[in-house]
Amino acid sequence: MMRRVTHLMSSLLMAGAVAINASSDAGAQDVFKSGVDMVPLTVTVTDASGKYVRGLTERDFAVFENGVPQSLSFFAGEPVPVDVALVLDVSSSMAVDMPRVREAANGLVRSLRPSDRAAVVAVRTSVEMPQPFTTEHERVTAAIDVLRSSGSTAIYDGLYIALKEFARERREHAEVRRQVLVLLSDGLDNASHVSADEMAGAARRAGVSIYVVALTDPALQARGTPWNVEQDGATHTMRALAQDSGGRIFFPAAPTELPAAYGAIARELASQYDLGYVPARPGDGTFRRIAVRVLAPASGIARTRSGYQAARSAARSDQ
């Protein structure tokens, strides 16, 4: 059944149904739990030329939280099952490009393994989820194939809704599953009720790897000002979103390059490591920085999310 987030978003925010408050303890719900609190990390390792480094073991990694070494409690050298949310800008400006959008998105779905799940989030003036998470990939491609463009662009709302769906999935399923969000958009947000800062706060708490495929806004190109101040701000927001989550941002020069961008994402998802640790320091509700290093004699550059919002422990909450 399609899930829809309409213009009632503003009322829901006021009612607190989906309110974001970066200073509240609500983010504690987004921390992965498997018996005990564990911080899950998806780690990409590349060499100096950008080629993926495979075959590393648990002994080849060192994890630091706020500069303090942590002991790994989970390691997987082969990719664990993945949940991928395809957040697609299907506003009016995407009308001409929709055939390429469908082709590229379906290509990524076809790269998934039988145990992987995918969902589709369609972003217009309002946000819809025509296909919730499922392992039935043919249902996902069918949902993509019937998407039609219309309306304005509520990108931040779409990202927020996808992140909250990931949080709900993590609370309801104890199994270790990697969570990945892939956003495609060609322009500026002009219809969201959620602000860029609120959306970024939700992303920091979610622990979801975010990949952004950013097409330049054709209207701005036509005016000869493809990188004005507004566009610069939007690009900075999307770049920071991808970088802080351990993902990547792509800038295809034309819609014909979309399949290549989605293909690069698929190859990266198949080449990553999954790590987890239980923090040595009790939760205090603060944001904690994470660093991962590859230890000699192995070599490589490790990329993961920049940090996480620590859950507040019960002991601290009672104080």
Image: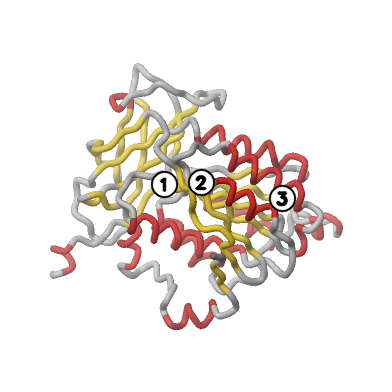
Inspect the image, locate mark 3, and give the three-letter code of the amino acid beneath it.
Leu
Q: Position of residue 77 (x, y in %)?
A: 37, 28
Residue holding disc 1: 306
Q: Residue furthest toward the top?
A: 297
SS at badge 1: loop
In this orientation, which residue lies closer to the viewer: 67 or 158? 158
Q: Is residue 120 left or right of residue 216?
A: left
Tell me the tag on residue 215.
3
Residue drawn at (60%, 67%) of the image: 127
How far apart in space, not on screen, are marks 2 and 1 (Cα)? 8 Å
Tell me: 223 left or right of 261. Answer: right
Nearer to us in this view, 172 or 159: 172
Residue at figure coordinates x 29%, y 44% from the top left: 65
Depicted 192 relative to depicted 179: above or below: below
Q: Amino acid at mark 2?
A: Gln
Residue at image point 33% right, 70% down: 24
- Mark 1 or mark 3: which comes first in sequence? 3
